[in-house]
Amino acid sequence: MKKNHDIINQIVIRDVIDLEQYQNNNQFSFEITKKIPGKLGRAGIIHTPHGDILTPAFMTVGTNGEVRFVSMEELKNINAQAMLSNGYHLRNRSKEIAKAGGLAKWSHWNRPTLTDSGGFQVMSLGSGIGKVVSMEREKEVVNAEEKDRLARVTEDGVYFYDPILKKDDFIGPEESMRIQCEIGADIHMAFDELTSLADSYDYNVEALERTERWAKRSLEEHQKHCDDLGYHQALYGVLQGGRWEDLRRSTAKKLAKMDFDGYGLGGAFLKEDLGEILRWCCEELPEKKPRHLLGLSRPDDILIGITMGADTFDCVAPTREARHGRIYTKFGNLRLAKYKDSTEVLDPSCDCPTCKNGWTRGELRRMWKSENLEERQQYFTLSSIHNLRFIIRLMEEARKAILDGNFEEYKEQFLKDYYHTSQQENH
């Protein structure tokens, strides 16, 4: 049996840059390095007080300021550049985090960080909706009955019942900004209202107008506290508007005129509409400000997102799916349940520590199914590292392809390799 310390191994990255050394006078800025010809996509660098983010980039999700079963050193060794944490879940520890000097120091990550506003979490208490569903599931998307909802949207903000703390609570734009500024990530998200696929056009108009008013209130409150921890904390405006082009373009134009440092691209929509929705938004947004696509990590979604102008991405899927035995490889996803006695490594072409140290599919399956807690936890670490490195490497390769001028060729070959096997075996 291999030892835990074998998990850690160094990765060589193509862009040589000290991600912890750069200090931009504690400010935030974005520069475009190269564009994809004829497309909205680009490679760039986001400068933050805690280091650079080479884009396109994936922000590893550490909901509570840590990635489950993966240490900060292990994240750095697979070239994770940034971490996204959850403002909703960290809100009751915000003063403790501020006292420690902010999220990067408190978490011992010491690299760029981002927090969301908490809006998605409290809105989902109201309807239980997901953000993206496939076409065949559209009819299944319905809002919860009014009597069953744990959240109520008002002009002030959202009143909700916290099922974890078992008490009533409230978050509005001002509360969200104060919480996020105490947590002290390098990038924050404005407070917004997430609608569902079940909501009508008329309700989306109402909700979008409210989100735009909340955007102004978020900016005003954020400007009061964004330098409280001794470095400048940036704020992104969040675009909603559902699946309607007029709403998406209209809100992009309005938010573009506000003094945001960048933009979050969010909302509930059909997966098939992703490219068009991103195009509508990014054609209207300022070119010289970064854009973050919220909550997506499928390779096809990422590559569409990059093509249409998204710079950074986040999603819990890589680690969550790893814990459930779903392993990412160049030629499609593997379900470990099928590999009881296999002596093959997870992915012969992978440069992650799990693969480089020779862990086989059969060994990992046995650990995954083990009744020994220590073995199961080691499996969670090994598989999470592998899946995260897969997505991070995809970003590195996409960036290199943009810089080399062959992104479209790279995208076509990657999708051909990945989805040919994946569709046959798993879908």
Image (cartoon, rainbow, N blue to C red):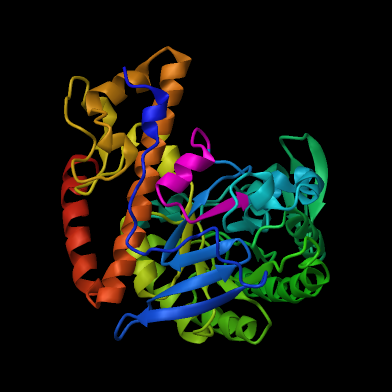
> On screen, 186 above or below 123?
below
Q: In which quarter of the image is residue 399?
A: bottom left
Q: Is residue 99 magenta?
A: no
Picture coordinates of residue 290, whole percent (x, y): 52, 74
Which residue is found at the position 62% from the left and 55% from the top? Answer: 120
Left or right, 161 with reference to 269: right
- The correct choice, above or below, for 110 with respect to 311 in the image is above
Q: Residue 159 vs residue 336: left or right?
A: right
Q: Which quadrant of the rendered structure holds the C terminus?
A: top left
Q: Nearer the viewer, residue 74 or 138?
A: 74
Residue sitting at 30 percent across and 18 percent down? 366
On the rendered image, what quadrant is the N terminus found in? top left
Image point (37%, 34%), residue name: 383
Which residue is most to the top?
A: 371
Residue 354 can be seen in this image: yes
In this rendered view, identify the residue nearer to me: 68 or 34.
34
Instruction: Report x, y in % for residue 265.
Output: 53, 68
Q: Which residue is drawn at 60% across and 84% down?
A: 256
Task: Give the number of marks.
Answer: 0
The magenta region covers 68-85
Q: On the rendered structure, is 345 left or right of 188?
A: left
Find out whether residue 84 is within the magenta segment: yes
Residue 149 seen in this snapshot = no
Q: Does residue 96 appear left or right of residue 134 in this picture?
A: right
The one nearer the camera, 324 or 205, is 324
Where residue 338 sits: x, y (%)?
22, 27
Residue 91 x %, y %: 75, 47
